[in-house]
Image: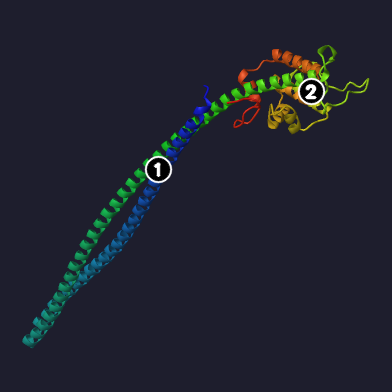
Amino acid sequence: MVVRKGGEEPQRQAGKVAADNSLFRLREALQTLASAEDDRARALGTLAAAEKQHKRAERVLAKAEEGRDQAALALAAAKKDRMRAVRVLAEEADQVYARVGSLDAMENSAVARAEGELADADARIASAEDDLVHADAQYRDAMGELVRTDAQRARAEEELTHADTRRAQAEKRLRLTEQQYNLTEQQYKRVMAEAGVARAAATTTAIESHIAGSFSSQRLNQAEASGPPEMASGPPELPFGPPADLPGYVLKPDPLSARTPAEFVELLKQYRIWAGEPSYREIVRRARNAFGASTLCETLKSSHLPPEKLVRAFVWACSGSEEDLQAWTTAWRRLRMKHQRPQNETMAAVTALPIDQEAPGVAD
């Protein structure tokens, strides 16, 4: 897919708008999640209050049960006292009947005492029965409070369940929003990558035109400086070119000895050293910015065969002669035919200029 230069900005804007929309939905999901957390916290507070009321009602119920037990004990004691009084009354009655001489006085006295004790016993029984009624009322109140507390607890648990459900829904929306955001970001990166490939292709074409123009212009200048064609003995050495080696000391690397792309790149490094080891920026300047310094650095670090245009510009920037250009070009062609690589891999290996710049001599 080739993206024209005029369509890069709208696609980049569309990608940014999609990313902003995803961020907005992400923030909405986070706000919903925070609201669900607040509802859950309130439900937990209500549940804690219901638990406290439940415990308080249980304590009141325990006290009522204790009062009821005490009232039951008091009633049992009163019944025992009544039975004891009845027995005393019977015994005294027997004694009265046994004493014939003072039957009336003793009988009246015993009856009076027995009746008094019996009245006291009845009073205690009535009091115990009142206490029992009061304890039963307290027990019923405690049971009612316990029922209300259980209802509050059930409502609090239901609210907690609803809060958990809302939280799960919010987390699901959040995950969906994040997935949509990731898809939008991937689409944006894909569009930017396609735009970069298109720009790299245009830049490679511009490099080829620039290098061809540079060689043509250089040869024309050399021809004009050397005079008529029949007197020219070849392209003159550049002013910054290295001197020749001494006889018997042939130190200039031979590119035709390379058997692999890695050996070819190693010979390029040695050729740079033989040429005086100019800096990367100096080589780029001599080649009239036909490639970038970072591109040259990555090329010399790689074990892959660099593009032919870069090799020719590199040899020329190292003050190579016409014979050097022919030798390096021949070695490159031989290795290229032997070790073929996909075209897109060769295009990605060299970027002559940054994307936001144009190659020298290339108009829009």
Marks 2 and 1: which is nearer the front? 2
Dot 1 amino acid type: Ala
Label 2 neighbourhood size at 10 Å, few (<14), some (14-19), many (20+)? many
Q: Is residue 280 visible?
A: yes
Which residue lies under the disc numbered 1?
29
Location of the C terminus by quadrant is: top right
Q: Residue at x 79, y 19 (%)?
A: 224
| Residue that sits furthest to the left in the current view | 104
Q: As rendered, which of 293 and 254 lies closer to the eye? A: 293
Dot 2 amino acid type: Leu
Label 1 neighbourhood size at 10 Å, few (<14), some (14-19), many (20+)? many
Q: Is residue 34 above or below residue 311?
A: below
Q: As rendered, which of 186 and 101 lies closer to the eye? A: 186
Compared across the picture, whether 277 is left or right of 163 comes to right
SS at mark 2 in the image: helix
Residue 54 in the image: state x and y as whole percent.
Answer: 30, 59
Decide which of tag 2 and tag 1 comes sooner along the chain: 1
Q: Is residue 332 above or below residue 69?
A: above
Which residue lies under the disc numbered 2?
267
Q: As rendered, which of 80 and 48 lies closer to the eye? A: 48
Task: Choose top left, top right, bottom left or bottom right for residue 27.
Answer: top left
The disc label shown at residue 179, or none: none
